[in-house]
Each structure stands twice: as structure tokens, then as C-alpha cells.
Amino acid sequence: MSATQASVGRNNLMANGKKALVGSAKASARLRAVGLRPTRQRRLLAELLFRYGHRHVTAELLHREAEESGGRVSLATVYNALHQFTAAGLLQQVVVEPSRSYFDTNCGSHQHFYHEDDGELIDIADDRVAVSGLPQPPKGTAIARVDVVVRIRRA
Ligand SMILES: [Zn+2]
């Protein structure tokens, strides 16, 4: 191991002696593929977001996960990164309330149940929702997509 590698290893140790999570080469490649520079913080967030398949996260949840994994990332940085990832097409944003947004790693066409009691977002396959009677869009525009959030409560 070179001196540089050893020092990187030491820097990644957390106070409790556990090794801090760092973004994988796969996370870097994913960021580069959409034109985002793979900074240390972006790599860590991409790693947390994409390592376990599709998921819905809030900025607060991702921030907590980053801290627990030993990363030093501010909540503002997490917000910025999530919006950059969304603009780059890595995520889609689902706004369920003015003050509550989820970021979805599944960018394919699908809709959501929103569980109001638990604050949980659940995927609905796109072919399970039919929206009819949409108004004619204003002249010179076309409907880009239709987002449906079906709000549910414990019955
Ligand atoms: Zn979803």
C-alpha cells in the first residue's frame, strides 16, 4: 500500500473506529455519465441512494444516513445534491406537500400511494392508474407527464 492510500484509509476512520462509507467506483461512474463531477460528497450520497435498488428518500433522511455512515455533509449540501441529481435525470422529485418532497431513484413512469399516517411513499405500477378527461393543454404546449399521488390513511 502506498503512503497516499494509507493516509486515505486513516482519514476514513470515524471516531468510533468504524470505517466511514465512501462512494464506490460505480457511484462515480453514475455521476460522470450524467455530467456531474464526482466530488467526495456527491459520491457518498450517490452510494447511499443507489446501493439498495429503488427507494424514496427525503433530504432529512439522506442527511441522517450520511452522518451515520461517517460522512460530513451539511443538510444544505444534501438538498443541493438531490436537486442536481434530479436535474441530471438520476432522480425524480415527488412533492406530496409544500413542505415535504421525496426523491425517487425510480425514474421510470409510475405513480404513488402516500400514506398520510406514516409519511411513506409506495409505488404503484403505471399501468394500474388510468387518468381520463384531461383538459386540452394551452396552445403551444403538450402534456409532459401526469403525476398521481393517491393519499391513503389507516382505515
Ligand atoms: Zn416511486
Image: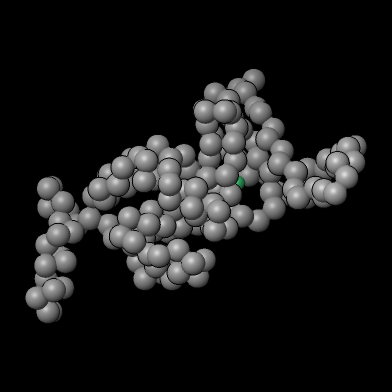
Q: Is residue 74 above or below residue 119?
A: below
Q: How is the image coloured?
A: one colour
- Locate residue 21 relative to residue 49 in the image: left or right: left
Q: Nearer the viewer, residue 130 or 142?
A: 142
The C terminus: image quadrant? top right
Give the residue at the far left of this rendering: 3
Q: Residue placed at 58% from the left, 49% from the top?
A: 92
Quadrant in which residue 95 is drawn? top right
Q: Is residue 12 left or right of residue 56?
A: left
Numbered marks: total: 0
Q: Residue at x 28, y 44 (%)?
A: 67
The outermost residue toward the front is 140
Q: Residue 108: percent from the left, percent from the top? A: 65, 56
93 relative position to 133: left or right: left
Q: Look at the image and tell me whether residue 52 can be seen.
A: no
Q: Is residue 153 above or below residue 126?
A: above
- Looking at the image, residue 11 sits to the left or right of residue 131; the answer is left
Which residue appears at 13% of the width and 74% of the height?
4
Where does the N terminus fall, quadrant-wise?
bottom left
Return the residue nearer the eye: 88 or 51.
Answer: 88
Kindly identify the residue that appears in the image at 12 percent across and 48 percent down.
15
Q: Residue furthest bottom?
A: 2
Is residue 155 in view from this perspective?
yes
Report x, y in % for residue 50.
46, 57
- Counting from the top left corner in percent of width and height, residue 60 is at 40, 37
Residue 6, percent from left and from top: 11, 71
